[in-house]
Each structure stands twice: as C-alpha cells, then as structure tokens.
Amino acid sequence: MTTTTTHSAIDTDFELVIGLEVHSQLLTKSKMFCGCSTGYANEAPDTHVCPVCMGMPGVMPVINQEAVRYTIMTALALNCTIPEYSKFDRKNYPYPDLMKGYQISQYDIPLSKDGYLTVELHGQTRKIGITRVHLEEDTARLNHHSGYSLIDVNRAGTPLMEIVSEPDMRSAEEARLYMQKLREILIYLGVASGRMEEGSLRCDANVSVRPRGQEQFGTKTEIKNMNSFRAVERAIEYEAQRQIEVIRSGGVVVQETRGWVEGRGVTVSQRSKEQAHDYRYFP
C-alpha cells in the first residue's frame, strides 16, 4: 500500500515513510503470566511481584485468558485474520528492566495478522495496513536519578498488546491521525485506558526518507519516548528533516534507536537498532 501525496512540511524532493509500533497495556485485573494484580499505580515499588514477575528459576508461566480475548477483539476490529494456532516465544536482549533476561512475546505465529485501519486525511480515505496484533508482557520500570537508576518491578508482566503497522504512512499528520483513531477503538472496546501520559499507551515510530519516485526504502531509525499525539507528530517531522539534512550533506543515515527529547524538540541517539535475528527468538 503506497501513496504519492504528502502533507508533511519536509523537503518536497523526498518522501517520508512511516510505520508505527503501538504498545497498549490491557485492562485485565491480573498480569500476563501470573496472578499478581495490575493495580499497582501509586503503590510502593516491588509490592505487586512474585517469583514469576522476578524471573526466578523453575517458575512456570500460566497465560491470562482475558488478555488473549482482548487482543483478538482488537484484531477483529482492525480487520485482521485470526489463525487457528498461535504460540509465544522468548525474545532475548540485554536491558536492566528485563527481569528474566528475556521477554515472553510472539514472533512468527502471532494471534493475528494482515489487517488494516482507515483514516480521513484532507478529504481522502487512507488505508493503513496492520502487519500484526500480538501479545507480550511489559517490562519493569526504570526510574532515573542523577547518576543512577532504580528498578520498580511492579509493571513487569503486565499484559501488553502490540499493534504493528505496515510502512504505509507518508506524513507525520497521518501518523497522528492513525494513533488517535486507534486509541478511540481501544477505549470503545473497553480493552485499554489509552492514557499516553501514564505510559499505558506507547508508540515507537520507524521513520525513513527516500527521493520522491524511488521505490526502495531508505535506512530507518526508530523513535521512542513519545508520550502524546503532539509529540508523535513533532518527533517524526524533526527526524525526517534531520535525515534529509544528513543525506544532502553527503552523509549516511545510520539505523539506530533515537529518543525524543520533548523539552528540546529533538531526537538523540540511544543505541544501534537491533535486527530480528539479534533477539534470538525461540519458542
């Protein structure tokens, strides 16, 4: 799915290509693979935990049926196909908020795939492909202080639904409209609160630019730390212009993860962007 028009303020010699990965906590009473309560807001750190949340050796996860039901409800609302069989996988990567050393997620056989969502943009109906809607567990929360960080495990294991779009969006405005409509659907279904300011709805944007008329995608960067619709739009516009300036100056865009700094209105490099094989997925 592609389009030849853009309403972004970027250089008209270039086309912007955007795909969004939206993570939404689900409104279940217990966590994804254990019986710990998800009602940990304003609670003392590490008080809603158990050996499963903490990743202790020998523990056995038990799936939350309600989380599966909520994910399938969302997938059907997004016109996805539901396979007869699905499975969970271990996603391995080193980060301090990952208590087990891996995340229970889904890789090659998710709960749903091949859907779409339509948005209205300047009098036109835009059809944005949905690659997949899958289910995983949230990580612990890192609380950063001057010179050190603390880990609160209360959030670890909260059911987290991920909605992955195709790279079908061609402007920051279109990405914002997609996010807003998706949030409306989640709230209407009653599966999520949609509160971006609290982190229960989060968005990562994969952004690249290419010369207008070129079919091959450019090198993408992933933008994180966007906690409002306005931040999503501003971050994408900034990153697109940054990439264009790199290309025009003779440089090369590096595939990496960049964080949005709201107060400065810029993205900053955080780490090199992993490929799927870097996560060493296995069932």
Image (cartoon, rainbow, N blue to C red):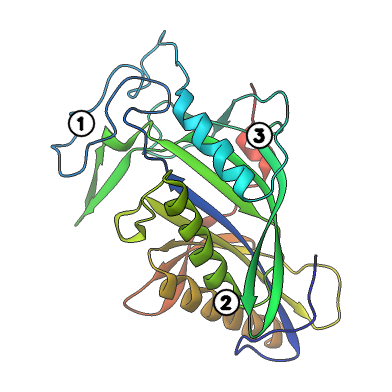
* Mark earlier in primary sequence (1, 3): 1
Residue at (47, 70) in percent of width and height: 232
Q: Secondary structure at mark 3?
A: loop
Is the residue 252 above or below the residue 183 in the image?
below
* Mark earlier in primary sequence (1, 2): 1
The residue tagged 2 is 172
Q: Quick one: label 3, few (<14), some, or many (20+) residues within 10 Å?
A: some
In the rendered image, the quadrant that contains the N terminus is bottom right
Tag in front: 1 or 2: 2
Could you tell whether 70 is left or right of 112 in the image? left
Q: CA distance from mark 2 to mark 3?
A: 28 Å
Q: Nearer the viewer, residue 199 or 215?
A: 199
Tag in front: 1 or 3: 3
Could you tell whether 127 is left or right of 234 in the image? right
**In the rendered structure, which amino acid carries the disc numbered 2?**
Ala
**In the rendered structure, which amino acid carries the disc numbered 1?**
Asp
In the rendered image, the quadrant that contains the C terminus is top right
The residue tagged 3 is 110
Say which quarter of the image contains residue 260.
bottom left
Q: CA distance from mark 1 to mark 3?
A: 30 Å
